[in-house]
Amino acid sequence: MNSIYSYDLEDLTKIMQAMGQSSYRSKQIFSWLYQKRVSSFDEMSDVSKSFREELKKNFNFYLPTISLKQESKDGTIKCLFRLKDGEEVEGVLMHYVYGYSVCVSSEVGCNMSCAFCASGLLKKKRNLLPCEMLGQVIAFDKMLRERDPETHVTHVVVMGTGEPFDNYDNVLSFIRIINSPFGLDIGARHITVSTCGVVPGILKFGKEGLQINLAISLHAPNHELRKQLMPIEEAYPLDQLIPAVLQYGKDSGGRRVTFEYILIKGVNDSIDCARQLAKLIAPTFGYVNLIPYNPVMENGFERSPDENVELFHNFLLQKHIKSTIRKEFGSDIDAACGQLRAKHVK
Ligand code: SAH
């Protein structure tokens, strides 16, 4: 039996029609689930008793539960979520001046094996279902509303453990549910999907007609270096990735991507790297989000010193590349990708 939380409005409408219902039924159910937040069919008082019984036979209300919660001094909250098969994934809530953002995991483990990342320490076990990504957002949203009814989740980034374009369909359904005005109603421009550079996924995503933000984890400005840090570079090298980003821009009506670039001391933080980076991405008009590396394991990688980060940043600005340095959250609570789960599983 599937969770009712795994269907986007379009899919649910088709199912309702197949069950002999009118198409507004799915909107009714959506508003019970996401606006009124009920957790049983019996509470859906404008649905007939007989049809409620039929719904009960076909769907459950499964969402992941919280198995561990860590709260940072800066207000960041990180949770481990337990799934129905006993697996665990992590999600993080961050408080920005502009609102509350949830960083969602999209898979149990990850197969991308980036050299610097703790998520890949545990290989991918399976894709997350739409309801399992949604559950992370709903749990944090509930937490916020209980503390202050005026606050709620305003932004979602699919940047936790997993490669979203390795679980494309489920991620898209999840996005449609949170973006729907009948669902969580989170604006497309408040939603970001981050990929390590799965080219077919980028091309497909550009044609979805959504106004969602796309982030590309770049981390190196040339093939040789990127190959050492990110095995995906073997499958989809930069000379395919950059054209795919250009194509994405055309297909999506001129949307610009954000390039994420972790700064690792002595590895990719030289001015020469900044020069190569500026040249590589200039044609895309993309933004660069510089991320001081968060040392997460014994791999010899260290954070780039603040002076280097500044120099790198200023160089990009001089070259007219829009660039920001990412604010850090929850450094006291294992908030970097995959850290909490990796520790817990150990
Ligand atoms: N697979 C997707 C999304 C998950 S990773 C992707 O690669 O984009 C989310 C971001 O966190 C990526 O940019 C990733 O490279 C970065 N990241 C991973 N480990 C990190 C660490 N230890 N310090 C800083 N950023 C890290």
Image (cartoon, rainbow, N blue to C red):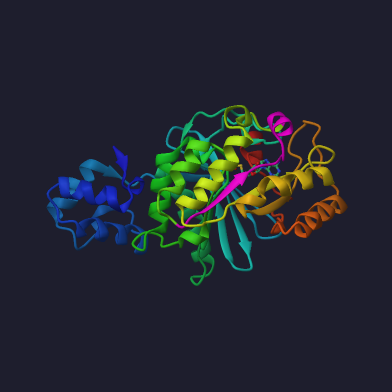
Question: Which x, y percent locates residue 270?
Answer: 83, 44
Q: Is residue 227 magenta?
A: yes
Which quadrant holds the C terminus? top right
Q: Is residue 164 visible?
A: yes
Residue at 60% in and 45% down: 216
Residue at 30% in and 53% down: 9
Please name whichever residue, 125 or 311, is drawn nearer the observer in this view of the structure. 311
Please name whichever residue, 236 or 103, is drawn nearer the observer in this view of the structure. 236
Residue range of the region highlighted in magenta in the rendering? 211-228
Question: Which x, y percent locates residue 265?
Answer: 83, 41
Q: Is residue 258 left or right of residue 321?
A: left
Count all numbered tags in the image, as a single digit: 0
Residue 42 picture quarter: bottom left
Decide: is 86 above or below 52. above
Decide: is 32 above or below 113. below
Question: Which x, y percent locates residue 57?
Answer: 21, 42
Q: Is residue 248 left or right of residue 177?
A: right
Which quadrant holds the N terminus? top left
Q: Is residue 196 visible?
A: no
Residue at 52% in and 52% down: 249
Ligand 1 quadrant in view: top right
Question: Which x, y percent locates residue 98?
Answer: 60, 68
Decide: is 133 above or below 124. below
Residue at 19% in and 56% down: 23
Q: Is residue 149 magenta?
A: no
Q: Is residue 296 left or right of residue 202?
A: right
